[in-house]
Image (cartoon, rainbow, N blue to C red):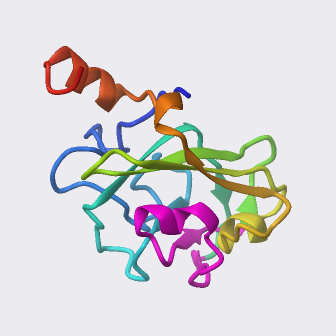
Amino acid sequence: MKFTNIKLADGTSGARPGQGLKRNLDYYVEDSEYGVGTCADSSTVDEDYYIVWNSWPEFNDSGGAADGTKSTDLGDLTNIGITTITARLKGNHVADTCLDMAIIRKSDRRAVRVCISGTNSCHYKNIQASDSNTTIEEIDPKDGPWTPEIGRLVNMGYIG
């Protein structure tokens, strides 16, 4: 299972020290107006994890950002130690954008894939495993995830 995007909006790899999950609107993808984190505070970085993605949703609205509720129906995310997740987003979902990401625990590289294919902002605002538009599945280590960070570690000889 391959994920191609790891660089944050500022060009830094999300797997690097000091980076991680952050519920800031432009932390992952510039101008996407969507952020996901384990903390309700948009300025706190959870350095135990990082996100890689294939597609990232976009939102727009001239008004302010909305905070999602703390989601606790997380399915396999609990297998990597995540017990709450919150989103922050602008009000209107941009058509033909969706979320396909993996959250990776830095300590052992265990990962969970989160896919949301909903067509309105409420699907992305409150991430719930029981939502029919959401899939949350642990990635079997033999299936990956293959990420730019794993490639870097293999090239440097840190993992075989």
Please give left or right for residue 19 compared with residue 117 in the image: left
In the image, residue 81 lies in the stretch drawn in magenta: yes
Q: How many badges with numbers are in the image? A: 0
Along the viewing direction, whichever of 19 and 65 lies nearer the viewer: 19
Q: Residue at x 35, y 37 (%)?
A: 7
- Rendered view: 39 above or below 80: below
- Left or right, residue 103 beside residue 70: left
Q: Residue 127: give x, y in percent of width and height.
A: 66, 69
Residue 3 in view (yes/no): no
The magenta segment is: 64-91
Quadrant that contains the C terminus: top left
Query: Quick check: 39 left or right of 107?
Result: right
| x then y, percent, for residue 113 | 58, 48
Quarter holding residue 14: top left
- Where's the N terminus, which quadrant? top right
Which residue lies at the image location 44% right of the left edge and 56% below the top edge? 26
Q: What residue is rendered at 85% in x and 61% in y? A: 132
Q: Quadrant of residue 6?
A: top left
158 relative to 121 in the view: left or right: left
